Amino acid sequence: MNPQLTSDGRLRHLLTLEGLPRAMLTQILDTAESFMDVGEREVKKVPLLRGKSIFNLFFEPSTRTRTTFEIAAKRLSADVVNLNIATSSQTKGEAILDTVDNLAAMHADMFIVRHSQSGAAHFIARHVAPHISVINAGDGRHAHPTQGLLDMFTIRRYKGAFHNLTVAIVGDVLHSRVARSQIHALTILGVPEVRVIGPKTLLPVGVEQMGVKVFNTMEDGLAGCDVVIMLRLQNERMKGARLPSAQEYFKFYGLTQEKLALARPDAIVMHPGPMNRGVEIDSEVADGPQSVILPQVTYGIAVRMAVMALLTRGEPA
Amino acid sequence: MLASLPDADTLITRLADAIAPTLTPETVIVGIHTGGVWVAERLHAQLDIATPLGVLDISFYRDDFSRIGLHPQVKPSNLPFSLEDRPLILVDDVLFTGRTVRAAMNELFDYGRPASIRLAVLVDRGGHELPIRPDFAGAVVDVPPQNNVTLSRESDGRLKLTLA
C-alpha cells in the first residue's frame, strides 16, 4: 500500500510522485488551475486553511522553494512558521523526531520538509500523528514532488496535453531529485517519449529502467523535442572529478540558441532554478522567447496551494 | 405529498421580468457554479446585458471544508470585469440553507467592493440557516429538509427542476 494515501485512496502526505495514479496528478493540476487567479485579485487570499499551522522545516537551505511554500500557505490563510535548522550530516534521527514532536505539541497541522538525506520526509511522515500531513520539499537525491508537479503544470499550460510530447531532461540526472520526480510524473501522465541527455558520468546506471531514452549528445537528444528541461549543475560535482570544467561542460551540454535550434521551433525551455548561467544554460536562452523559467516560479505557488488544500481535511464526515 | 415544481423556463422568464426594471448600464450578473451559472447564462441573454457574465466557484470559501475537504471538481472563478462600485446580481439555482450564498459573498468581496448585491434564485425551497433571503425568486416552495430540489441540464440544453 502506498504510505501517502489514506485507506480510501485520498492523498495524506506528498512524499514522491512515484506510484500515484494519473487521476490524482490531474486533480492536483486542475485544482492548481483554479488557484491561478487568486494571485491576481484585489485580495490575494482564500480562507481555506484559516486557523491551520504549517511549519516549513528546512534542514537544507533554499530561499526560493521555502518562499513559494510560504506564499502558497499564506494565500490559503494558514499561519506559517519557518524553521531553518542547521544540521551536520551526523544529525541523528532522534534529534529530528524531537523537533517534530515539539512542533506537534504546538498543534502543527502540516510539515513541509527539506533535507539533504533521501527518505527524511518519509521518516517524519511515519512518525507523525494521523491528523498531520507531510510534504516533501526535496530529500537528498530522491524526490521533489511539488517541483515535478509544477513542471507538469507548466508543460500543460504551454503544450495543452501530454500524450503527443517528446520531453528531454538535460544534465546532472544522477544527483537530481528534480529529474526523478519529473520522470515519474511525465511517465504517469502519459508522455510517450521522455529522454535524458548528459555525459555518462552524470546519468544513473540503469536509468533506462525508468522508461526513458538515453542520449549522450545534445545533437542526438534535442532533435524533435517539444520541451527541454535543463537541470542545475552543482559546482561540487566538478570537484568530484565527474567533469573536467564548467567551460568544458558548457561547450558540450550548455543550452545555447544554436543547440536549441535542434529542437522543435515551438519548444519551451524549463529550469528548476537557481540557474548557473554560462554553465548549463546560456543567458540568451534563459532570457529568450522560448524560456518559461519565470512562469514556472509563478505556477509553483498555485501548485503548492493545490497540494496543501488537497492534503488538508478534517475527520471523515 | 410533495409539491410539484414549475417548469424551469417559466421561472427564468419570471425572474428576468422581475429583474429587468432594476437594471442599470452598470449592473453585472454573477452565477454560482454549477446550476447558478446555467440560470445566470439565460438571464444574461434574456436581459441583453453587455458586461460579460461572471462565474463563481465557491469551493475555496465553503464553511464545511474542514469537515469534508475540497470538492473534487473545483472550477476557476472568472469575473471578467471590475465589480468596484457596481450593482451586482448574484444568481443561484436553489436557495436552501444560505451557506453557499454566504460563501459567494465572502468571495465577491475579495475581488472588490460592489455598490450592492442582490440575490436571484430560481427556487427558494425554505430551510434557511442564515439570515439570507432572495431579492428575486422564480418560485417559493416549502420543501421538507429530507428532500432535494436539483436543477439539471438536458443534452439539448434545456433546464429541468427535479424534486426527490
Image: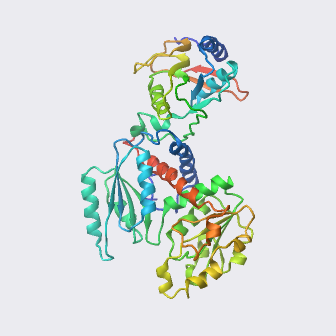
Quadrant occupied by the C terminus of chain B: top right
Whether residue A55 is situated above or below residue B163 in the rendered picture: below
> Residue at position x 72%, y 59% from top?
A164
Regarding residue A7, the answer to whether it shows in the image is: no
> How many badges with numbers are in the image?
0
Residue A281 quadrant? bottom right
> Residue at position x 55%, y 53% from top?
A25
- Residues A240 and B87: in front is B87
Regarding residue A39, the answer to whether it shows in the image is: yes
Position in image of residue A121 (x %, y %) = 39, 63
Residue A154 quadrant? bottom right
Position in image of residue B4 (x %, y %) = 58, 12
Position in image of residue A133 (x %, y %) = 38, 53
Relative horizontal placement of residue A183, taking residue A13 as reference (left or right): right
Relative horizontal placement of residue B133, taking residue B45 as reference (left or right): left
- Residues A80 and A203: in front is A80
> Residue at position x 69%, y 57% from top?
A163
Q: Which colour style is shown?
A: rainbow
Position in image of residue B104 (x %, y %) = 49, 29
Whether residue A306 is situated above or below residue A266 in the rendered picture: above
- Residues B4 and B15: in front is B15
Whether residue A10 is situated above or below residue B76 in the rendered picture: below
Whether residue B104 is situated above or below residue A290 in the rendered picture: above
